[in-house]
Amino acid sequence: MSDIFHEVDEELRAERAKRLLLRYGGWLIAAALAVIAATGAYEYRQWRQRQADEKLAAIYLEAMHAATATPPDSKRATEGFATVIAEGGAQGRAGYRDLASLQQAALEAAAGHLPAAITIWDRLASAPDTPPLLARLAALLSVQHQLDSGDPAMLASRVAALETADDPYRPLASEMRALLDLRLGKKGEAKQILTTLSRDEAAPPGLRQRAGAVLIELGG
């Protein structure tokens, strides 16, 4: 008798399961399909992002090759960097956009178009979405290319912001401040900065040597 009851119980459970499946099966299938669709959409977006990154990287590298060729193909390089800047900005690829902007500024400066280069550097230095290190580098490059022609007081104030103890560009900024002091006729202040730089173990060796050489020219 127990076997009969067991078989009846199994049939009842099977019938209940069948009714539940008929009642909710459509919703379960729909939910499963939604999960599959969402996963597929995510994978597709990831694939498209990888494709976009690879495309921008290829254009950037091609432009770099053109810029560093012998002789340089400045036109092709400029067009390539301009494409990366435009597409990188539109696609939210700020890294490619900013690197291409730096290269574009370098090409402008090399071609003698200094105002255009300074405009690019200053834009990078002040843009809120530029990474801090890259923004400080852009500011430094802007100051460097105006040491002989820009307003020394204005440039000195910009350099001062880069002379914090933990800034990797501090030694370069200090060197520029010394050169600006010389333009302003502050020979004593310049010599003091250069003396400190020549003994600064944290400064690059080449910079220490330059500081020492300028000190000799200034009479120690």
Image (spheres, helix red, strand yellow):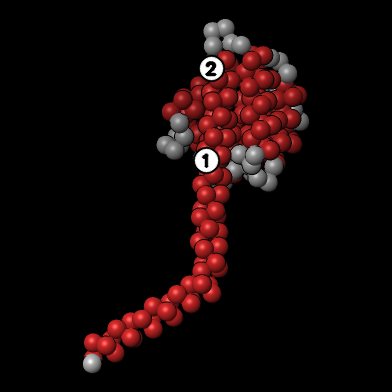
User: Label 2 sits on what residue type?
Assistant: His
| Badge nearest the viewer, 2 or 1 | 1
Residue at the bottom extreme of this rendering: 1
Q: SS for tag 1?
A: helix
Residue drawn at x 48%, y 72% is 21
Q: Amino acid type of disc 1? A: Trp
Q: What secondary structure is marked by label 2?
A: helix
- As measured in the structure, the alpha-carbon distance from the residue carrying label 2 to the one carrying label 1 is 27 Å
Residue at position x 65%, y 39% in the image? 91
Give the residue at mark 2.
Answer: 65
Task: Locate residue 22, reporting x and y percent.
Answer: 51, 72
Res. 122 mark: none
Q: Which is more N-terminal, label 1 or label 2?
A: 1
The reply to whether residue 100 is in sight is: yes
70, above or below 178, in the image: above
Give the quadrant of residue 118.
top right
Q: Give left or right: position of 13 versus 24.
A: left
Q: Quadrant of residue 183?
A: top right
Give the number of the disc on residue 47. 1
Give 43 or 123, whichever is nearer the viewer: 43
Q: From the viewer's perspective, is residue 218 above or below residue 40?
A: above
> What residue appears at the point 59 percent right and 43 percent down from the top-left corner?
131
Q: Is residue 95 above or below residue 14?
A: above
Quadrant in which the N terminus is drawn: bottom left
Q: Is residue 167 left or right of residue 158?
A: left
Mark 2 surroundings within 10 Å by alpha-carbon count, few (fewer than 14), some (14 through 19), many (20 or more)? some
